[in-house]
Image (spheres, rainbow, N blue to C red):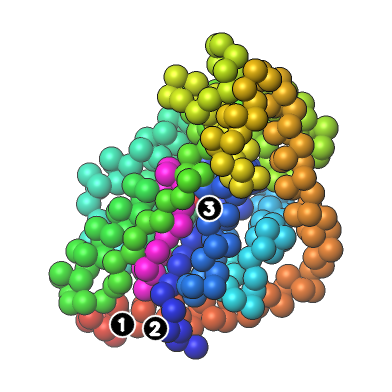
Amino acid sequence: MLTQKPIAFSGIQPSGIIHIGNYLGSIKNWLELQDRYQCIFCLVDYHSITVRQTPAELRKNTEGLLKLYLACGIDPKKSIIFIQSQVPAHTELAWILNTITYLGELKRMTQFKDKATRYKENVNVGLFDYPVLMAADILLYQTNVVPVGQDQLQHVELARTLAHRFNQLYGETFTIPQPLIGKGAKIMGLDDPTKKMSKSAKNPGNYIALTDDVETIRKKIARAVTDSGYEVKLSPDKPAISNLLTIYHLLSNIPIKDLEKKYTDKGYAKLKKDLAEVIINFLKPIQEKIKTLDQKTTNQILAAGTRKAQTLSQLTLNRVKEKMGLI
Ligand code: TYM
């Protein structure tokens, strides 16, 4: 089963809404890697429970995310798809990596600081330790590249640091992973273009969910914040229009320069109207495909993915244990 291709690993938390930021920052790039890399795509449910989840919803969201992976074009014949909590090596390696991670390193993590402020009533140890579990996810598969959005860069850097540290302490064991950051690495909120689009945003107008219906998409784009002036241009002093243009470009493949030309003298309203239709047309086949996926098929895909992930991860875990003197 060991493949000659380099390894790409990534994952998404099954915590409810998956938005076009998630798609453009990660899934879109995954699709392009499937032929050149042995891709491993995880549903990282152990990460989700660092924030309180309703059990029935977590189950539903995990099943929904699996269908979304498939509907977006992740091909189970090429890529390994599995659920994190079904492969125990992830938490085992996380424990081991805990012993070479410094408190100061985790205290510096901006996502922890942000979530600790947002979820004040539940600043649990798992939330703090989250980046170590993510390092374990990555390092278990001797990963070469990690396609993620900008907000995960600091976590991938930590995985690199821990891999180096372990290799130095116990001898060559882990491949050093490289982050892979694409053009859609930081899609901003529709209601506030100074902050990233986020699934935990209180205002649903912040994002377009991949499951949003036609009317919702039209409404959300119509209400999206714009900049002063009227010129349709990619520019640092036009964060809102630049964000809309980026989304338009990435979903349509029309170069930004051409879009700027197309909307000269047409104004923001026309840009928004057309963008809504671009998003609707892009999401339509995905939403239709989701409806055709039945439980039996998804169960079979998961069972095969889990078996492969277990085998691959166990090889690394055994090596780690041996190097450390664990019997
Ligand atoms: P998560 O579930 O928050 O997000 C999934 C992916 O979407 C990207 N993303 C964005 N990209 C562009 N613009 C945005 N506004 C935006 N918001 C989110 C994220 O960068 C991510 O790539 N910790 C990870 C999941 C994880 C993981 C891993 C990823 C766990 N273990 C190992 C890679 C490798 C997370 O919470 O992603």
Q: What is the crowding at mark 1: few (fewer than 14 residues within 10 Å), some, or many (at least 20)?
A: few
Q: Position of residue 72 (x, y in %)?
A: 68, 58
| Number of numbered tags placed on the structure image | 3
Q: Which residue is mark 3?
A: 26
Q: What is the crowding at mark 2: few (fewer than 14 residues within 10 Å), some, or many (at least 20)?
A: some
Q: Point out the stretch of residues depicted in magenta.
A: 138-152
Residue 118 appears in the rendering: yes
Q: Which residue is mark 2?
A: 315
Residue located 65% across and 30% down the image? 262
Amino acid tagged 2: Leu
Q: Is residue 123 left or right of residue 97?
A: right
Numbered label attached to residue 224:
none
Amino acid tagged 1: Arg
Numbered label attached to residue 319:
1
Amino acid tagged 3: Ser
Question: Nearest the camera: 142 or 272?
Answer: 272
Q: Position of residue 18 (x, y in %)?
A: 64, 46
Asked whether mark 3 lies closer than 8 Å to ligand 1, one says yes
Residue located 55% across and 69% down the image? 34
Q: Is residue 111 above or below residue 270?
A: below
Q: Earlier in the sequence, mark 2 or mark 3?
A: 3
Q: Is residue 147 magenta?
A: yes
Q: Is residue 228 above or below residue 83?
A: above
Question: Nearest the camera: 49 or 153?
Answer: 153
| Quadrant of residue 68 within the rendered picture | bottom right
Asked whether mark 2 lies closer than 8 Å to ligand 1, one says no
